[in-house]
Amino acid sequence: MREEEERTEFEIHGDAAGEGAPAKGGCCGYISTPVNWLKMLSKQTHWSFVLGVIAVYGISQGLGGALGRIATEYYMKDELKVLPSEAQVYAGITSIPWIVKPLWGLLTDVLPIVGYRRRPYFIFAGMFGALSTLVLATHDNLHKVLAIACLTAGSAGVAIADVTIDACVAQNSIAHPSLASDLQSLCALSSSIGALVGFSFSGVFVDLIGPKGVFGLLVLPAGLVFLLGLSLNEPHIPDFTYRQVNVKFLNASRSMWTTLKCPAVWRPCLYMYLSLALSLNVHEGLFYWYTDKNAGPAFSQEAVGYISSIGSVGSLLGAVLYQYGLKDHPFREMLFWTQLLYGLSGMLDLILVLRLNLRLGLPDYLFIVMDESVSQLIGRLKWMPLLVLSTKLCPPGIEGTFFALLMSIDNAGLLSSSWGGGLLLQMLNVTRTRFESLWLAVLIRNVLRVTPLAVLFLVPRSDPNSSILPTDLLNMSSGEDGVDAQAEKNGDDIELAPLVSSR
């Protein structure tokens, strides 16, 4: 979630893209350059892979995730009426499906349904997401436990769809090493653009139709995933022997464990977990504060949506900046500066909570727009090299499942961050109406953000264009992973690349 003759840059030339001459300057150049870039990626990988990334990352996760985030925040605050610390814990619970992503990856790798490895799981993910959001949209006074269960089910639907696209990205990154950064940029740009559109309308929709009405709209992205499963051009696997499933699970698990024990793999994994877990998430406390009419700035629902949309612009700029100027920098150098800037950018939240911006003559709305933009830009710059590094740690034969494992480690870090932030808010007695200690929670979070620099030595000094895995792991035979030869042979023709490569 393996050779390339020459490096293809983001400034696409006609011979690399196979499409005419280089883009000219002016407005046409700004339009033709990304178009040629997409054509190049479609030619080097496959057009359906590119469309799949845009559909899942851009529409399901970007657009749908933005609408769902704002709706969920107001749903917990106004419908369920929970404390900020409780909201942090519940947000962590809804992320659990992302932690068990290796399970989804293993299922799609070794357990075909009615002869198909991918299509049934896309269909299942779409149905799961659509049904869960419909329950939230159509039921009044839903019990808290059932509401969290539905939110978790919706999250599971997105995670199941995501694991296949992650596998495609990982496999194509190994098949085309020089495109690894470009593929991560495609994912980031799709997600950022989708989130920008989603956040732009999220506040308006919440104000007009309420959080439950927005949940009703989320049936549409889930339906798109369902249609993707119906339309996927995937060869049928006849006479699959289901008695081999246990053996395949064991072989895949053994290969993953062998890879994870390698120091070149577990050391970066440990850093990725610590860098996320130590950056405590106190977002719910800040959200309750800046929507409070007495203690905070009392931002409206529309304002909250617009603020998040401008933050998405910062995230988009971060992805573009990484693609144009930073994607070839060594991992350790990039992570040092981004982690340091990430900690410093948190001081903007502290200035806002202490209302120092008013003393400087900066209105709350203007300052939080600046805060959100800078934070999202730096956050994206911090996240991009971690994603590229993750694709470099995936051995041939188990790319999809192992990439899902790496992403589950990252999500475990985010879960630790969310629950740790909830515990901090609880200890400091930050409630729905009391925010006297919120500034201290923000300060503690900012200090902890820079502590991962102490273990930066765990990250390799290499750059994204070089190989990280030892030779023995790179030469791992896909036959060791227990995938039957006929399925692997057929898998090479699947329009969306298989989770387990036959090469």
Image: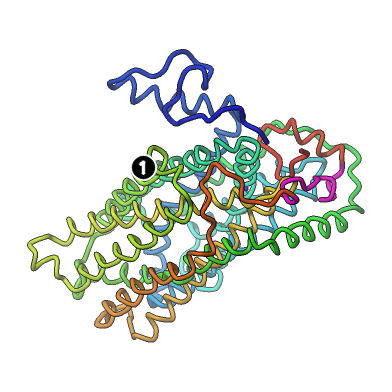
Q: Where, by quadrant of the figure, is residue 307 drawn?
A: bottom left
Q: Position of residue 503 (x, y in %)?
A: 76, 38
**One can see residue 19 in this view:** yes
Quadrant of the image occupied by residue 434: bottom left
- Residue at the location (92% across, 53% down)? 243
The stretch in magenta equals 472-484
Judged left or right of residue 114, residue 359 is left
- Residue at image x 32%, y 48%? 314
- Please say whether residue 211 is visible from this viewpoint: no
Whether residue 178 is situated above or below residue 399 in the rendered picture: above
Residue designated by label 1? 321
SS assignment at label 1 = helix
Coordinates of residue 464 in the picture (x, y in percent): 52, 45
Residue 253 drawn at (x, y percent):
77, 60
- Counting other residues with Cα less than 10 Å from the Cα at mark 1, is it few (<14), some (14-19), or many (20 or more)? some
Give the residue displayed 41% in from the left and 65% down from the top.
75
Q: Is residue 488 left or right of residue 19?
A: right
- The type of residue carrying mark 1 is Leu
